[in-house]
Image (cartoon, rainbow, N blue to C red):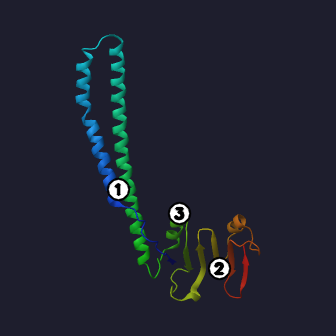
Amino acid sequence: MAKIHGNDPTGYSSSAADALKSASTALASSIGGQSGSRSSSVTTASAEFRGYFSEVFADNADIASRSATKLVESLQSLSGFVQQLRDAAKDEDDRRKQAKEWTAGLILSHAEAMEIADSKRQLIDGEFLGYLPGSDLTDESNLVVRIDAFDSGEWTVTVRPPLTTMSEAFDRTHGPARPGRPATRLEEFGPRQQTTL
């Protein structure tokens, strides 16, 4: 079981995002809609120009046409990115709201907890309680492992030997439990044997 504490909403302004998306879409449409009349005007004007000036005019018209196309593409991309950010902010706010509603904690299987752990890059705060399958989750005497994460940099790992112990991989990564390393604490249930990693 994990106790997940939901954060406050992101504060993302959907109305500002909608206004930006609407403005960029309208501007892209306006610029794109001018390409036909601009092309026609360039053709008409080019018939009257001769010599070097006609070459400069043709080059400038070509640059203006390519630039307009790139600008339209950029504005359309902006509109798409704004929508992606808006959707992501809504999803994040929904997750935060759901997390705040979990008062009893979220109950996950070992596989589900591992899947979440593998997909996350950072955990700010969390309390994770591990029980043997089928045991009473309201009875803390059935607890075999507890992990407390604080501010993404400090972890307390509490185990109940012989039901569970720290793995050799943990010891290889973080070193054996010993005093003097304040970031993480290894503590065993039962007779208190507290050391720091």
Query: Which residue appears at 68% of the width and 68% of the height?
Result: 170
Depth check: 10 or 132 in front? 10
Badge nearest the viewer, 1 or 2: 1
Question: Disc 3 marks which amino acid?
Answer: Lys
Where's residue 161, x and y in %?
67, 81
Q: According to the image, label 3 marks what residue?
A: 120
The secondary structure type at the circle numbered 3 is loop
The quarter of the picture where residue 148 lies is bottom right
Q: Given the current orientation, which residue lies at the most extreme front position?
A: 53
Instruction: Tell me the CA gap for discs 1 and 3.
Output: 27 Å
Instruction: Tell me the CA gap for discs 1 and 2.
Output: 48 Å
- Which callout, 1 or 3, points at the residue further toward the start of the chain? 1
The quarter of the picture where residue 77 lies is top left
Query: Which residue appears at 37% of the width and 61% of the height?
Result: 13
Question: Disc 2 marks which amino acid?
Answer: Val
Depth check: 62 or 180 in front? 62
Where's residue 193, x and y in %?
73, 83
Q: According to the image, label 2 marks what residue?
A: 159
Residue 148, placed above or below residue 39: below
Badge nearest the viewer, 1 or 3: 1
Depth check: 122 or 141 in front? 122
Q: According to the image, label 1 marks what residue?
A: 17
